[in-house]
Amino acid sequence: MNAAAFRAGHVALIGRPNVGKSSLLNALIGQRLCIVSPRPQTTRHRILGVATREDGQIGYLDTPGIHAGTGKALNRQLNRTAHTALAGADACVHVVEALRFDNEDRAVADAALSAGIPCLLAINKVDAVKDKERLLPFIAQISEGRGYQGVFLVSARRRSGLEELEDAIAGALPEQDALYEADTLTDRSERFLAAELVREQLMRQLGQELPYSTTVEIERFELEGRMRRVHAVIWVERDGQKAIVIGDKGERLRDIGSKARIAMEKLFDGKVFLETWVKVRRGWSDDDRALRELGYTD
Ligand SMILES: Nc1nc2c(ncn2[C@@H]2O[C@H](COP(=O)(O)OP(=O)(O)OP(=O)(O)O)[C@@H](O)[C@H]2O)c(=O)[nH]1
């Protein structure tokens, strides 16, 4: 085998909710492509982020957190999306949080290591660990008896340990030509990313269970010269939820819209005119047909 051969393929970042998969993908590709919030189950779709290097091309796949309990149709869909990404990948990175390994992590490890592809372990959030000596026994505890091809201590927040992880991922991919043009960042449209950026604000700004009753649909996305005109519908499940999203005198909705617009202007590198409406679609999160219509697919 030629050691200098070009390697390319897809690597699925998988793990339980909230371990930092989206943050890690963003840090690895150096762009805020995937939305991030302190709440579990922020990611609802498989999102590709491409990094092209001299010796290879890595297609990182962000995936929804794999969680226990089937819950609503949306929960089942999120688990399916993650498992489908894993099944279609050439390698995977199991992402865990430093010093935490529970039954959900164990279940993800089982799925990752039985997928028949090289699997690396990334222990994220090491910046939050004060006593670094605790990391060695933690590594031993979770890697013993499990066939990870390598273990990496990383911090998506501080961007530490990423080069070593990226080199190992590139080395685990098959020898083949690039799958995407060298300047490709993602296969997702600006329309899709616009919906995600509105949803990010809902995840960040709404309390308790309300974010899980919301989803975003872009009704109109038009380029007018260099300006993008975006009409976003925020779907909720009940009238009472609509009032909360809109807020007193429309204040919360204005704040959600203005923060999402700023994030879009940064990502799209151009002016954005964003209008948002809140509408009710009863029971959408537990209705397979509604989920499909609202863009949820494996
Ligand atoms: N201290 C610290 N926090 C981090 C790090 N990486 C991510 N976080 C935080 O962890 C939380 C979850 O991050 P996400 O990237 O949304 O996690 P995820 O695994 O994609 O979450 P799901 O969408 O639930 O699957 C956010 O509040 C992040 O800011 C890190 O390296 N260090």
Image (cartoon, helix red, strand yellow):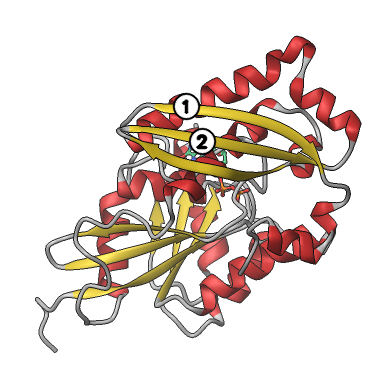
Q: Which of 47 and 116 is in front in this view?
A: 47
Residue 233 placement, left or right of 142: right
Instruction: Find numbered disc 2 in the image and state the secondary structure of the residue it sits on.
Output: strand
Please state the horizontal and vertical placement of residue 56, each as a whole percent of the image.
20, 68
Q: Circle 1 sits on which residue?
A: 273
Residue 25 placement, left or right of 290: left
Asked whether mark 1 lies closer than 8 Å to ligand 1, one says: no
Please state the horizontal and vertical placement of residue 263, each as a whole percent of the image.
44, 30
Asked whether mark 2 lies closer than 8 Å to ligand 1, one says: no
Please count the marks in the image.
Answer: 2
Crowding near the residue tagged with mark 1, few <14, some 14–19, many ≥20 C-alpha atoms within 10 Å: some
Looking at the rendered image, the quarter that the N terminus falls into is bottom left
Q: Are marks 2 and 1 in contact (CB under 8 Å)?
A: yes
Residue at 43 percent of width and 47 percent of height? 190
Question: Within the image, what quadrant is residue 104 found in?
Answer: bottom right
Question: Within the image, what quadrant is residue 4 found in?
Answer: bottom left
Hey, which residue is sitting farthest front in the picture?
224
Q: Give the CA separation, mark 2 to mark 1.
A: 6 Å
With respect to residue 288, does 2 lie above or below?
A: below
Q: Tag on residue 249? A: none
**Which quarter of the rendered image does ligand 1 occupy?**
top right
Hey, which residue is sitting farthest bottom in the picture?
1
Looking at the rendered image, the quarter that the C terminus falls into is bottom right
Residue 62 placement, left or right of 71: left
Q: Circle 2 sits on which residue?
A: 230
The amino acid sitting under disc 2 is Val
Q: Work out whether residue 61 can be spotted.
A: yes
The amino acid sitting under disc 1 is Phe
Residue at 63 percent of width and 58 percent of height? 295
Residue 289 placement, left or right of 146: right
With respect to residue 99, does 169 lie above or below?
A: below
Q: Which of 209 and 1 is in front in this view?
A: 209
